[in-house]
Amino acid sequence: MRRERGGLHQPASNPANPFGPGHGRLAQRSSDTWCGGGLSMSISNFRVDYLAPQMLDATARPDDRLSGYFRHQLVITASRKREAIQQVIDRGGVVLDVIELQAKGRLSRLFGSKVSRSYKQKFLQALAFNVRSGLSPEKSLEQVILGELGEPRLILNQALNALRQGFGFVAAVELLNWFDDSTLAVLSAGEAAGQLSEALETAVSFYEKGSATLKLMFGAVTWTALDLIMAVSTVIGMRFGLIEQLKATPLMSEDPAKVAQYNSSLALAEWVNNGLLVFSFVFFLILIYFTMLVLSPDQKTRTQAFGILEKVPVIGELLICSGIAATTRVLGSLLTGGVAFLNAVQIARKGTITPTVSLFWQTITDRSEIGEQPAVAFNHPLLDSSERLLIRAHKDQAQLAECLASISQTRDDKANSAARKFAVIAFVASLAYSGIAVLFSLAVVYLQNEVVLSGA
């Protein structure tokens, strides 16, 4: 950021246009280029501190030194500092300080802190508060963006610019690239059903719980990766360390049979370690391939990747349980908020891209559309007998929401158990993997020591 002192600029006598003629040209970055009439000018964002004799917005606070004046902050988009200052003067303000907000460099963006999940969650909460108070979705988003005076404003300006070009609420939020497809799908379905306020509140809890699930899965994958790295490093050490050392020091023995046995064992250990290294290389290629599929921007590709992962015993259980937990939590929250059952189901089914869970909700939607009651529609083999029994016992929508909350908690526990089981299996597999290399190499060392000690 570049800080420049604006000094004390006296306000104009006619603040007819409170935001000035240049207000509204929002840039997608901190500095864009706008061409018009054959001229090219740079558009920048300025954060202005100023005084005013009255409270003009929510940032106003009484000034400690000047009685009757209030300090304000405002982010203004303008071609140069003078234009930003003039906009404040036109609205009756006395400029104190001007800071140009600048986008970080590539290295700073790569290694610097990004917008946290906590910030994104509170962003959704702020939107929910505004919509609940009666503002339209687009106006709510605009108010939240205008209230941001820090560096996130550089990103939020993209959504604000889209709103002022006529884009809808969800389309503008999607431009931020802050939320996953499941969260956006919940918002989109809620907007289409006219239940955006409930969808926003649901998205907040969904995103909050998704953070815990993400940490759980990230922890399991991280420990697994560390186990694999340690195992592969052990194999590399055996192959290019100990085995090469044994090959460089041939067995000194007068018994040809023992020399042949030693050479044969050494060759076998070398082949085993080579095989393990080849296996490691192929495994890492497959792992990288699936990682690219899961992180692909194409939703169809990600769905196919999750479909394959579902067939892996422990990982499949983890994905299905976490998917059911998330979607039943969404549905229960919507039902508690008074959303009609069918509309709530159509919103909830957007909260997962796991194929089995998506098919589960599609089946419930189809059965509900032909008139089946929820107690019958939820009679699906993906739910266990206790979960189906619980749903059949409900009497009204409030009780159904309680049933779904209970199922969500149970499935969360199962997902946590599956994650721990996956970590244990990966740890044992890595021990077995590295143990094979160590055992074959130590067998050669044992044979060498036995021959030396026997004096043969």
Image: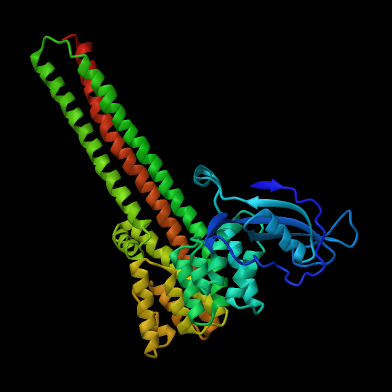
Instruction: Give above or below for 5 relative to 293.
Output: above
The quarter holding residue 15 reads: bottom right
Instruction: Please tell me in which quadrant of the rendered image residue 228 appears.
Output: top left
Is residue 379 at least partly visible in the picture? no
Q: Position of residue 136 (x, y in %)?
A: 60, 78
State the count of labels.
0
**Residue 96 spot, x, y in % from top left:** 78, 53
Q: Position of residue 407 (x, y in %)?
A: 47, 70
Could you tell whether 389 is left or right of 300 in the image? right
Q: Quadrant of residue 182?
A: bottom left
- Residue 39 lies left or right of residue 415; in this view the side is right
Q: Nearer the viewer, residue 47 or 378?
A: 47
Nearer to us in this view, 7 or 327: 7
| Residue farthest along the bottom direction in this orientation | 371
The residue at the point 67 percent across, 64 percent down is: 147
Q: Where is 353 relative to 367, above or below?
A: above
The image position of residue 284, as x and y in percent, is 30, 44
Q: Quadrant of the C terminus?
A: top left
**What colour scheme has been applied to the protein in the rendered image?**
rainbow
Q: Residue furthest front?
A: 38
Residue that extends furthest to the left in the rendered view of this protein:
256
Q: Residue at x 55, y 71 (%)?
A: 163
Q: Residue at x 36, y 66 (%)?
A: 354
Q: Nearer the viewer, residue 204 or 251?
A: 204
Q: Is residue 129 left or right of residue 38?
A: right
Please state which of residues 97 and 327 is positioned toward the viewer in this rendering: 97
The answer, for residue 438, to whether it is visible in the render is yes
Rendered view: 76 above or below 369: above
